[in-house]
Image (cartoon, helix red, strand yellow):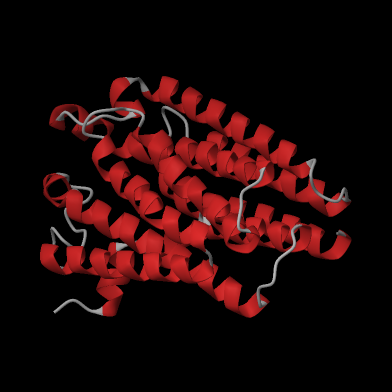
Amino acid sequence: MATIGDFLRLVKFSHTIFAMPFALLSFTYAWHTTSHDHLLGVILLQVVLCMVFARNVAMGFNRWADRFIDAENPRTAQREIPAGKVSARGAITFVAINAVLFIITAATINSLCGWLSPVALAIVMFYSYCKRFTPLAHIVLGISLGIAPVGAYMAVAGTSSWECWLLALVVMTWCSGFDIFYALQDAEFDRKRGLHSIPSHFSARTSLVISALLHVASLAFVVRFAMFQPQSWLLWLGCALFAAILLLEHILVTPTKQRNIGIAFANLNAMASVTLALALILNIVIFA
């Protein structure tokens, strides 16, 4: 029988660290710049739960949809479903439960979040099928994660703003760029299996150039978002550290040096999101 740990590994719960900091940044910005009548502890808990439930749906459904592909790929054959640690029925039941919990929780926040919750789920689940027909699957993943800061802002303000959409663009371009890194590992398998990704369509060098361009765009959106913030040394230190970490990723991963993909994908990207979000959250709290 599958354990709680098996399900946490199924959805790579630790990777929540990628989008969660941006959701909390957007939440903090909305809290300090809009009028609202929420209790801080209550609305924060609702936002965090929505993040967790939505990500469980996205990753759980992805693992369920890809279970046969994962079984054929030596790199992924030991994932929980192909390895028999979690059954396909158990995984899709887990997805359904989290989907219901997400919609219910979103509906308790405000009507806008409630009505848009099924749309958000449709987007994050649609991503799982994109690599079957388009190399732009990386962009769809970025869009799926970029929903987080928009949803967090809407939860507080009951509407959206240019600022939260800028954060969505930061997340979309940043995540799309590092997902290209990750896909380098499966480029040959994807070609043989008829799956689509930037690395399966282009050389490693071209793929990394596309990744770098996406990260340059992400930095541009970060700087634009920073223009809306109280100006301080802390704000620009956070932006500079984010840029430095992204640069380090591109130094560590090259067409001929791909053994550092794991470090760049998991460690450095977790560091990038936490560093930027923490600096900007503190900037808002201290200087707003």
Location of the N terminus (image quadrant): bottom left
Q: Residue at x 71, y 63 (%)?
A: 31
Q: Is residue 91 above or below residue 266?
A: below
Q: With 141 as the anchor, is 71 left or right in this view?
A: left
Q: Nearer the viewer, residue 280 or 253?
A: 280
Q: With 103 as the anchor, is 84 left or right in this view?
A: left
Q: Nearer the viewer, residue 282 or 193?
A: 282
- Hey, which quadrant is residue 279 in on the image? bottom right
Q: How many marks?
A: 0
Q: Nearer the viewer, residue 120 or 238?
A: 120
Q: Residue at x 34, y 34 (%)?
A: 137
Q: Position of residue 238 (x, y in %)?
A: 74, 50
Q: Position of residue 24 (x, y in %)?
A: 62, 62
Q: Is residue 262 above or below residue 187?
A: below
Q: Position of residue 61 (x, y in %)?
A: 25, 55
Q: Residue at x 44, y 70 (%)?
A: 105
Location of the C terminus (image quadrant): bottom right
Say if residue 84 shows up in the picture: no
